[in-house]
């Protein structure tokens, strides 16, 4: 029996299962969507399910024609996901509750449909992880070192071109003003979004696996480089035109411009890597 035939034959049972999942996560998913809306670091969460769905759509013929061979060990993964949901609920730990969604979906795929369909759905299911906001403890542990690194690089460049500047931690001290390299300037926001975009772009392009991995890995230095340029530009403006020039409209515009630069670099690198096709 193929996956398509299985859906037709057991449509009522699968419909009931979807309703059960909706009931289990009736509070978890809406709360996560609210965070996507309120936290700019995770606003890309709105498009992640759509991209995951697109990955599945690209393989729709293989998926629909896949042979169904239920794999009983998948039930263990389902139970692990449900246990994770319970523990997260008891401890009010949102990350555990949210990530259990992907674990349960992966387990159900294995349990009901088998390993062949799971392999085809591995990318769409794995991509859903990008929609889950990181715990703030993990976020801060990444953002703070990035802030310090971006600050050091920016200070070194500004001093090299003759700008009088000093550093204290993530604080940039200029003769006329003092600037703080905040989380938004560290590159963490761009990094999270670029990783999600990089994975989608890498699997869209016709190239070998190692080139895909290289493209995804390069999203990290690209994000850091782009945000270092933002800090350097802000330092120049503050030095020669005063602190007001580095605030307000410029600060907001610079954030968009930096992400635009990072996207251009990512697209250019992807085009370059894809030139060799699958070689």
Image: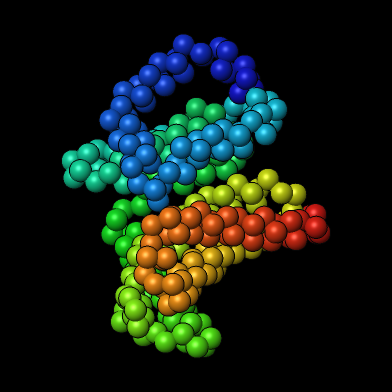
Judge from the rendering whether residue 253 lies leftward or rightward of residue 21; answer left or right.
right
Judge from the rendering whether residue 270 lies leftward or rightward of residue 251; answer left or right.
right
Q: How is the image coloured?
A: rainbow
In the rendering, at what x and y percent does residue 154 appear? 46, 77
Judge from the rendering whether residue 9 lies leftward or rightward of residue 129; answer left or right.
right
Would residue 86 be seen by someone viewing this image from the given angle? Answer: yes
Please tell me whether residue 2 is drawn above or below residue 133 in the rendered image. above
Please tell me whether residue 167 is drawn above or below residue 192 in the rendered image. below
Q: Residue at x 59, y 26 (%)?
A: 68
In the rendering, at what x and y percent does residue 48 appear? 50, 40
Q: Who is closer to the viewer here, 75 or 127?
A: 127
In the rendering, at what x and y percent does residue 276 appear? 81, 59
Q: Who is closer to the viewer here, 25 or 151?
A: 151
Judge from the rendering whether residue 81 lies leftward or rightward of residue 65; answer left or right.
left
Q: Residue at x 38, y 41 (%)?
A: 36
Q: Residue at x 45, y 16 (%)?
A: 15
- Quadrant in the picture for the N terminus: top right
Q: Residue at x 70, y 27 (%)?
A: 61
In the rendering, at what x and y percent does residue 199 appear? 58, 51
Please state the total of marks drawn on the protein image.
0
Would residue 143 be seen by someone viewing this image from the given angle? Answer: no
- Quadrant in the picture for the C terminus: bottom right
Q: Residue furthest front?
A: 241
> Where on the picture, by quarter, is residue 251?
bottom left
């Amino acid at each position: 029996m193929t996956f398509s035939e299985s859906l037709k034959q057991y449509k009522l049972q699968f419909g009931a299962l979807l309703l059960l999942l909706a009931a289990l996560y009736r509070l978890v998913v809406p709360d996560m969507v609210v965070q996507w809306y309120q936290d700019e670091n995770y606003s890309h969460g709105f498009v992640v399910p759509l991209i995951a769905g697109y990955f599945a759509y690209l393989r729709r013929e293989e998926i629909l024609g896949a042979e169904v061979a239920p794999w009983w060990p998948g039930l263990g993964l389902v139970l692990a996901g449900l246990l994770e949901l319970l523990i997260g609920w008891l401890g009010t730990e949102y990350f555990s509750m949210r990530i259990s969604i992907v674990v349960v979906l992966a387990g159900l795929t294995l349990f009901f449909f088998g390993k062949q369909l799971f392999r085809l759905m591995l990318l769409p299911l794995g991509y859903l992880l990008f929609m889950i906001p990181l715990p703030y403890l993990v976020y801060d542990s990444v953002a703070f070192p990035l802030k310090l690194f971006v600050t050091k690089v920016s200070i070194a460049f500004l001093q090299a071109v003759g700008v009088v500047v000093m550093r204290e931690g993530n604080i940039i001290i200029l003769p006329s003003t003092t600037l703080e390299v905040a989380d938004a300037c560290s590159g963490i926001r761009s990094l999270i979004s670029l990783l999600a975009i990089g994975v989608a772009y890498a699997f869209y392009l016709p190239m070998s696996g190692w080139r895909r991995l290289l493209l995804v890995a390069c999203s990290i230095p690209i994000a850091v480089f782009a945000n270092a340029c933002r800090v350097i530009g802000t330092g120049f403006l503050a030095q020669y035109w005063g602190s007001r020039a580095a605030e307000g409209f410029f600060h907001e515009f610079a954030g968009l411009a930096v992400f635009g630069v990072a996207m251009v670099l990512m697209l250019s690198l992807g085009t370059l890597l894809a030139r060799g096709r699958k070689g």
